[in-house]
Image (spheres, rainbow, N blue to C red):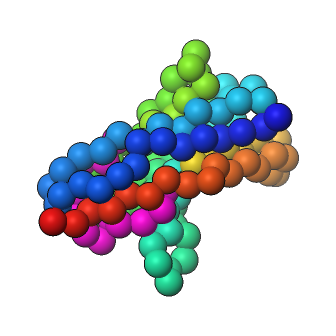
Amino acid sequence: QVQLVESGGGLVQPGGSLRLSCAASGFDFSRYDASWYRQAPEKERELVAGITNTDDTTYADSMEGRFTISRDNAKNTVYLQLNSLKPEDTAVYYCNAVLRSWVGVKLYDYWGQGTQVTVSS
């Protein structure tokens, strides 16, 4: 059974930090590109950061420098370190794993159920 299970969300004060984890199972995670997205109330889901199966990373402009994505294929897990958190970072954070063909066609696309991050004093 394919699963992506996020954890690590919670309530944190402005300026604080959190580390999100996403544990994959049921597929060969090492072959997949992984990403974190977020969705705030009444807003569109947006890309936060991505990491390819060769460890190339990409970040949304507003988050680069504060957030760090990483992966541990031995643990089938992708992480998102959130630093210097702001109230506008409040959202549900989702994990995504995608397998693409050699020409970039999306073959498989999996999502987690999300974890809530709330930044408030």
The range drawn in magenta is 80-93
Seen at 44% across and 58% down, the residue is: 116
Instruction: Pinpoint residue 113: horizontal percent, then vertical percent.
Output: 62, 53
Establish if 54 lies above or below 119: above
Place residue 63 in its image quadrant. bottom left
Q: Is residue 87 above or below residue 53?
A: below
Q: Is residue 92 magenta?
A: yes
Residue 55 in view here: no
Q: How many marks?
A: 0
Residue placed furthest toward the top? 74
User: At 42% from the left edge and 66% from the top edge, which residue is drawn?
Assistant: 91
Residue 81 horizontal/vertical position (percent):
34, 41
Q: Residue 114: x, y in percent? A: 55, 54
- Locate residue 93 relative to residue 11 in the image: left or right: right
Q: Residue at the bottom extreme?
A: 42
Residue 62 in which image quadrant: bottom left
Of the 4 image quadrants, the one containing the N terminus is top right
Image quadrant containing the C terminus? bottom left
Residue 8 image position (x, y, % from top left) = 41, 42
Q: Nearer the viewer, residue 21 or 109?
A: 21
Residue at 48 percent across and 62 percent down: it is 92
Which residue is more in the foreground, 6 or 30? 6
Q: Is residue 2 left or right of residue 64?
A: right
Is residue 34 a member of the stretch shown in magenta? no
- In the image, what residue occupies the spot 40% across and 49% down? 9
In the figure, 79 relative to 18: above or below? above
Residue 48 falls left or right of residue 106: left
